[in-house]
């Protein structure tokens, strides 16, 4: 399961940077906000549900010429048959093709009932694709209607989480959709959940960061790691 953290080294932005300009227009500071889905919704409310500016921002940020990262190349060489991602970019598909593999990319409901012959890997893009920037999942309205418009993806992801071992990489576990799916699996299977893994960077002190702020981030990180065990997700920390 690939999150935005894997695409940032290629030159793409995380959610905070994606929404920085519209947050400034709202008179808010994106660095002081944690609920980024609601920020996107505030912009939509202000513009009477007109998404044109949001769509333009997504187009501008994710249509840049970017190079495939070494991490993408490593993943594409491994015998991984299923990729899930919340990213809009095409780095996973490009890296698979560069490795002479055939990806079967799915980001609409219709895609789920179709298969590419002789495919090597399925790439589920549960929040949409840059080629359909106007339809990507971004605002609170999008998340709240997700089970109605993309419920089949929730079902497919639930099935994979039950039957397959996942490696979460570049993912922050703040996505409402994934949280819903994990919670449902936890309450259904209780102490019989499949074991999954997640790679996370150890907390390091930033330049000019005071000791109390650093200690606070370390404490919170430990609590997040401990909480993920409830979903049988084991964190592998790296420097």
Image (cartoon, rainbow, N blue to C red):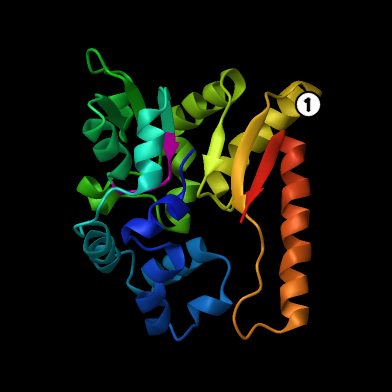
Instruction: Provide residue 180's location: percent of width, then percent of height.
Output: 61, 40
Instruction: Examine the residues drawn in magenta and state their main secondary structure.
Output: loop
Residue 25 placement: quadrant: bottom left
Q: Nearer the viewer, residue 223 or 143?
A: 223
Q: Is residue 166 left or right of residue 189?
A: left
Q: Nearer the viewer, residue 178 or 218?
A: 218
Residue at 24% in and 24% down: 102
Instruction: Provide residue 5's location: percent of width, then percent of height.
Output: 46, 54
Residue 100 seen in this snapshot: yes
Residue 150 seen in this snapshot: no
Residue 46 placement: quadrant: bottom left
For the image, the number of numbered tags is 1
Instruction: Provide residue 195's location: percent of width, then percent of height.
Output: 68, 27
Question: Where 41 sits versus 212, above or below?
Answer: above
Question: Where 114 sits versus 97, above or below?
Answer: above
Instruction: Provide residue 132's location: percent of width, then percent of height.
Output: 23, 47
| Residue 118 magenta | no
Q: Residues within 10 Å of mark 1 (few under 14, many from 20)?
A: few
Question: Where 44 sits versus 227, above or below?
Answer: below
Helix, strand or loop at mark 1: helix
The residue wearing badge 1 is 190
Residue reaching furthest to the top: 118
Give the magenta part as a residue range.
Answer: 84-89
Q: Quadrant of the C terminus?
A: bottom right
Residue 27 placement: quadrant: bottom left
Residue at 53% in and 23% down: 160
Q: Nearer the viewer, residue 44 or 10?
A: 10
């Amino acid at each position: 399961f690939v999150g935005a953290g894997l695409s940032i080294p290629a030159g793409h932005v995380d959610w905070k940077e994606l929404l920085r300009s519209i947050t400034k227009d709202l008179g808010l500071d994106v660095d002081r906000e944690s609920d980024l889905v609601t920020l996107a919704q505030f912009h939509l409310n202000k513009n009477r549900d007109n998404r044109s500016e949001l769509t333009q921002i997504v187009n501008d940020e994710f249509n840049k010429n970017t190079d495939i990262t070494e991490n993408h190349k490593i993943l594409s060489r491994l015998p991984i048959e299923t990729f899930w991602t919340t990213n809009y970019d095409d780095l996973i598909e490009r890296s698979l093709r560069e490795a002479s593999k055939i990806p079967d990319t799915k980001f609409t409901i219709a895609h789920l009932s179709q298969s590419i012959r002789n495919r090597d890997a399925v790439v589920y893009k549960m929040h949409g694709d840059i080629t359909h920037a106007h339809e990507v999942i971004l605002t609170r309205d999008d998340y709240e209607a997700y089970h109605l418009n993309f419920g089949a993806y929730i079902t497919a992801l639930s099935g994979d989480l039950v039957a397959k071992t996942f490696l979460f990489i570049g993912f922050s576990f703040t996505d409402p959709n994934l949280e819903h799916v994990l919670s449902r699996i936890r309450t259904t299977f209780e102490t019989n959940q499949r074991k999954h893994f997640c790679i996370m960077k150890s907390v390091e002190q930033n330049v000019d960061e005071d000791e109390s702020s650093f200690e606070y981030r370390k404490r919170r990180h430990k609590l997040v790691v401990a909480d993920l065990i409830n979903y049988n997700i084991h964190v592998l920390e790296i420097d």
